[in-house]
Image (cartoon, helix red, strand yellow):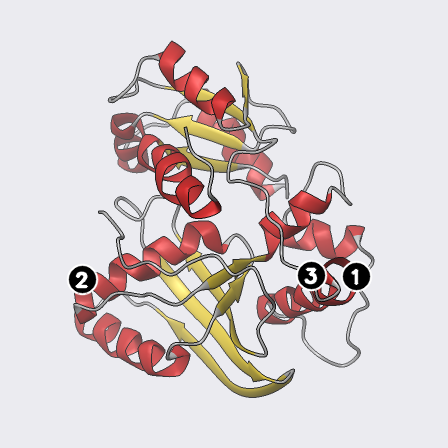
Amino acid sequence: MKREFKGHILHEIPLDYVILDIKTTGADPYYDSITSIEAAYYLNDEEIEQFSETFTGSEADKLIILKHLQQFIGRRPLIGYSIEFTIDFLYDAFHTYLEAPLSNDYLDLKEVLRKTKRLQGNYTLSAVCKGLKLPKKQDIKETEILLILQVFDYIRNEVVHNKKVDYCTPLEDRRCVFTGKLQRLGPKEASQLLIQNGGTKEDRVTRKTNYLILGNHDYCSNIEEGKSNKQRKAEVLKQQGYDIEILSENVFYDLIYEKGTRHGTSH
């Protein structure tokens, strides 16, 4: 799907915003789906309202949840961690169920932190909070929303200092492994495209791998049928807390042509 009305990447820190955490079954909006959404609306650093819903699979329930979410977020900027991936799920859901675009601007804290190079290797949310030694709030359950808010506070106070927000491009410094047959490009062309956009091609999945990229047919069939050894290893590493995602060929191209363009860099 061409997401022509999608919002832009924020380069300034907003005062009025929604912290957003979307859980999905995978990384491809075409093959995978949203399982839950949590959000919190903040104005001048004060929490105004919360939103929390789980998708049961009922089409009627999805429509009701998305209508409520649409009212909740309004036109406010969206702030999340790895939101570069999950916002596409929400855009497609708005398009399908509400026949309306999701055009809110957004800020991906993970890509901002990666640009600072203050941490090495693992940029999962839990690893970042631990690596930055962010203080735990006493007597408060540490939800994903609170962790994202802590990272946002750190970026505002320790990184940005009233300057423009700077990002890594989607594939910059990312270690990638291809597996399966790609539909649109051959292995050599896909590797060249990856390298041109700042990524590094590797042959096997390790703890340092960031993206395992599957051909669309392999990604689709592996959801319902058997999985390759590379995919099984990637899933184990992800469960162990390593910074690795399993992408379809579709998402790989989105990282370059759609998201790369929004960052101002694509080849």
Q: Quadrant of residue 62?
A: bottom left
Determine whether the residue tagged by mark 2 lies in a helix, strand or loop: helix
Q: Which mark is residue 230?
A: none
- 201 or 226: nearer the eye? 201
Above or below residue 176? Residue 59 is: below
Mark 1, residue position: 158
Identity of the residue drawn at 39% across and 10% down: 188
Identity of the residue drawn at 33% across and 58% down: 6
How dense is the environment of label 1, judged by Cα within 10 Å: few (below 14), some, or many (20 and up)? few
Above or below residue 88? Residue 56 is: below
Q: CA distance from mark 2 to mark 3?
A: 37 Å
Dot 1 or dot 3: first in sequence order is 1
Q: Is 107 positioned to the left or the right of 35 in the image?
A: right
Q: Amino acid at mark 1?
A: Glu
Q: Are marks 2 and 3 in contact (CB under 8 Å)?
A: no
Mark 3, residue position: 163
Q: Is 70 positioned to the left or the right of 241 in the image?
A: left
Q: Is 250 positioned to the left or the right of 22 in the image?
A: left
Determine whether the residue tagged by mark 1 lies in a helix, strand or loop: helix
How dense is the environment of label 3, judged by Cα within 10 Å: few (below 14), some, or many (20 and up)? few
Q: Amino acid at mark 2?
A: Thr
- 21 or 12: nearer the eye? 12
Q: Amino acid at mark 3?
A: Lys
